[in-house]
Amino acid sequence: MTHEGKDGRETGWRPKLVLASASPRRLALLQQIGIEPDALLPADLDETPQRNELPRSLAARLGMEKARTAAQRLHKDPELADAYVLAADTVVAVGRRILPKCEVTDEALQCLRLLSGRAHRVFTGVSLATPKGAVRSRLVESRIRFKRLSEAEIEAYLASGEWRGKAGGYAIQGLAGAFVINLIGSYPAVVGLPLYETVSLLSGEGYPTHLLWLNRV
């Protein structure tokens, strides 16, 4: 694939990239740094932690499994068979306790009460499957402290519905940003995709991460 600058000259060739996620947040983060995936291919996996599995191990494992699963599916698509595959998974934990991706109100209520007034960790595993069959990975750990939440704040947040499908029952990029006293680590990793590590993985495997920057005004 080639791209032309505003003067019509070719600026280079770009291999294809598949994002193994249906998350609009991960897509938006990639687009923020000038990377537009050629396809979205969610990798549906059983994300249940294994027995005695630690939060950081779960995030790393699921990131790698998503990348591998999506890469295997690409072999059946001649247009994407040589694409890079990027995947990520985010796990929220208090100590060794892994918090769920909340789907019902009671789950979110329990998570918010647990997180209220205390620190927790967010682990994000990002993995890249290359056209040569290798899988490279990084794990990012961030620490977040929430303010002490009143029952009125919890009830209002639950009523917003923003927590649905979110690890730990909240979305830091939304209303719950008002709960955060401090964050040590990577904000985009907490949202869903660590940008520094993602660019490092892509660049290290020969993907031209800065190519599209050349055409920006």
Image: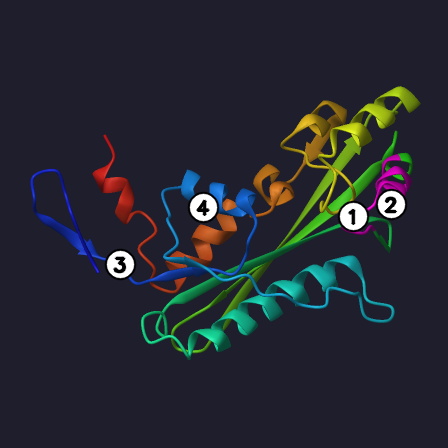
Q: CA distance from mark 4 to mark 3?
A: 15 Å
Q: CA distance from mark 2 to mark 4?
A: 30 Å
Q: CA distance from mark 1 to mark 4?
A: 26 Å
Position of 112 with respect to 134 (left or right) is right
Identified at 81% across, 70% down, the residue is 50
Crowding near the residue tagged with mark 3, few <14, some 14–19, many ≥20 C-alpha atoms within 10 Å = some
Q: CA distance from mark 2 to mark 1?
A: 7 Å
Identified at 74% across, 42% down, the residue is 164
Which is more N-terminal, label 3 or label 4?
A: 3
Crowding near the residue tagged with mark 4, few <14, some 14–19, many ≥20 C-alpha atoms within 10 Å = some
Q: Amino acid at mark 3?
A: Arg
- Percent position (x, y) of residue 202? 41, 58
Quarter occupied by the N terminus? bottom left
For residue 60, the mark is: none
Crowding near the residue tagged with mark 2, few <14, some 14–19, many ≥20 C-alpha atoms within 10 Å = some
Position of 84 with respect to 217 (left or right) is right
Residue located beneath label 4 in the image: 30
Q: In the depicted view, which residue is nearer to us: 83 or 106?
A: 106
Identified at 39% across, 54% down, the residue is 37
Residue located beneath label 1 in the image: 103
Asked whether the residues under the numbered discs 2 and 4 touch, taking CB atoms below 8 Å apart as contact, a structural biologist would say no
Residue located beneath label 3 in the image: 14
Q: CA distance from mark 2 to mark 3?
A: 43 Å
Asked whether the residues under the numbered discs 2 and 3 touch, taking CB atoms below 8 Å apart as contact, a structural biologist would say no
Which is more N-terminal, label 4 or label 2?
A: 4
For residue 107, the mark is: 2
Q: CA distance from mark 3 to mark 1?
A: 39 Å
Disc nearest the viewer among 3 and 1:
1
Q: Which residues are magenta?
A: 99-112
Q: Amino acid at mark 2?
A: Glu
Quarter occupied by the C terminus? top left
